[in-house]
Image (cartoon, coloured by chain):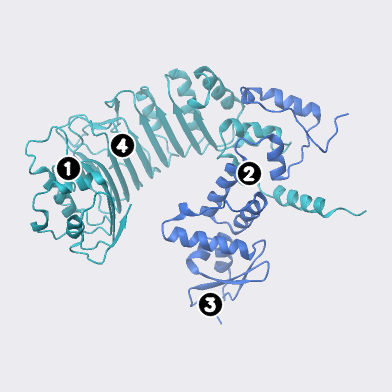
Amino acid sequence: MKRGTKKRIKEKNEDRFSCLPDYVLLHILSFFDIKEAIQTCILSTRWKNLWKILPTLTLISSQFATFEAFTKFISKILSLRDASASLDVLDFQCEGRMDPRELKRILTYAISHSVKRLRIDVNFDIQQFLPSLFSCHTLTSLHLSIYESPRPITLFPNSLNLPAVTTLALNGFLFCVGDDGRVDPFSKFDKLDTLMIYGACEVRDNKLNLCISSTTLVNLTIRTNYSAAGGIRFQLYTPNLCTFVYHGHIPFQKLCGINSNLSSIKHVLLDMTIGVGMWSNPKDNPLLLLHLLDELANVESLTISHRTLKVLSLVPYLLEIEFTSLYNLKSLKVDGKFITEGMLYFLLQNAPSAKVILY
Amino acid sequence: MASSSSNLISLKTSDGTVFKVERALAKTMKTVQAIIEEADANIYMIPIHNVFSHHMDMIIDYYKLSVAGKSKEFSVEKLDNDELKDFLLAVHYLNMEDLFEVLTQAVADRLEKKSVGYVRKYFGIENDFTPEEYAAIRKKNDWAFKGDDIEPEEDEEKQEE
């Protein structure tokens, strides 16, 4: 019996793909829209129950015609999913007020199924769920974004137990003073290497600094709203910080904490503006940018936004100012439209062989 | 020539081409790394089955881009569906974490919003449901199909009689 080559190739293909283990297929499925992932149940008997052990769940309310459809859908998944299959990733983005009991069901499910990476993006209060979230031992990555109003409403808990968390991203949190009289919310994380503070975050008592104390922190991104009242005053105690991205007001005081420095930082992105309402001494404020650059003396790569260049352009007699920083600079990335010769000269005076990239 | 003292590892693809790659690149291939670690003596040449030279070219491209911090510039757009699947199988065999992530995402992108028939063809899946089983599973999971226009099954090979 002779078979055509086309059929032979087709069979070969089928064979090769049928020896792909489930985890590879599941990996591909994890990138699918959740509905499409579940719809693969009709492909073949092998695929019938595959979706039930999908370790990634991305639930986005805007993908559903009505809020009711969204909650019903979630309910179905939770009841039909294989109860013994762990859930590695839960990405929950919900616009609209969800019944707290429904949300509790989803979060309890995730925690009891050893969730590792959790993202919650909502516009309503979830304070009541924080104790269980902040004591979940399986979590390695936690991203919480709560934007109920322009001002933050959620209190970041002072007592937490997240021994495995390496990545933390927060929007909409109020940081409070701890037992030692300081606001130092991240010191209790043993493995934190990446921290992102963005959007509407504030310190409850805004006379106090927000200390970021972590010997394990390597990447820090700060991106707080320009309108945040007063803005957070950060104090870094991060001896191993390597990458620093900072969008916000130029700090009035030194960024590094007492008896600390920022010499470990190698890569920096600065997108700075002068704080509104802090025009007490407008002449001094642009100079504060230079103080910040002094603190970042060791950096090897520096990216500066056009807003930052604007501030730099306000420094009077820039080229006559003694500047000893940025001597390790290997690359400088700036907005080509706003950079001037003078500014370039100023920034590169101690590292003339640094590469300049214009974007 | 022993290669343990040098920083290059020799890999021989299925089509007989020998690639000398940096140790750091070989390290990203867990399968190869395991072979290196298991061998007490110096390894002269490591054969990599199921991997062709055109796969190695792309693997080296990706490696060079990621070392330069430009891994996002790596693209598999020029590969057709079969070539992409083939590449995924090679990377899967070599057990390369990052590239595996990139390729599974690329496969998922190509299958996004495609019909049942298309997906079956892509994976070479045979529909082994009986018509009754198919109807039952479709009904049971109707909640996941709501609002989507899923065509009733059209299978060229099976004749419903």
Q: Is residue A87 visible?
A: yes
Disc 2 marks a residue whose amino acid type is: Leu
Residue B136 versus residue B46 in the image, above or below:
above
Q: Is residue A8 left or right of residue A288?
A: right
* Gap in angstroms between the C-alphas marked 1 and 2: 49 Å
Label 3 SS = loop
User: Is circle 3 on the same chain as circle 2?
Assistant: no
Q: Which residue is mark 1?
A: A251
Q: Which residue is mark 2?
A: A25
Q: Colour of chain B?
A: blue
Disc 3 marks a residue whose amino acid type is: Ser
Q: Quadrant of residue A326?
A: bottom left
Q: Nearer the viewer, residue B120 or A159?
A: B120
What letter labels the chain drawn in cyan? A
How packed mark 1 is, by other alpha carbons closer than 10 Å (few <14, some 14-19, many 20 or more), is many
Q: Is residue A305 left or right of residue B30?
A: left
Q: How many marks?
A: 4
Q: Which residue is mark 4?
A: A198
Label 2 SS = helix
- Subunit ID for the residue under disc 3: B
Disc 1 marks a residue whose amino acid type is: Pro
Q: Nearer the viewer, residue A135 or B81?
A: B81
User: Is circle 4 on the same chain as circle 3?
Assistant: no
How packed mark 2 is, by other alpha carbons closer than 10 Å (few <14, some 14-19, many 20 or more), is some
* Gap in angstroms between the C-alphas marked 4 and 2: 35 Å
Q: Residue B64, image x and y in percent? A: 47, 62
Contact (CB < 8 A) between labels 3 and 2? no
Q: Which residue is mark 3?
A: B3
* Gap in angstroms between the C-alphas marked 3 and 1: 54 Å
Contact (CB < 8 A) between labels 1 and 2? no
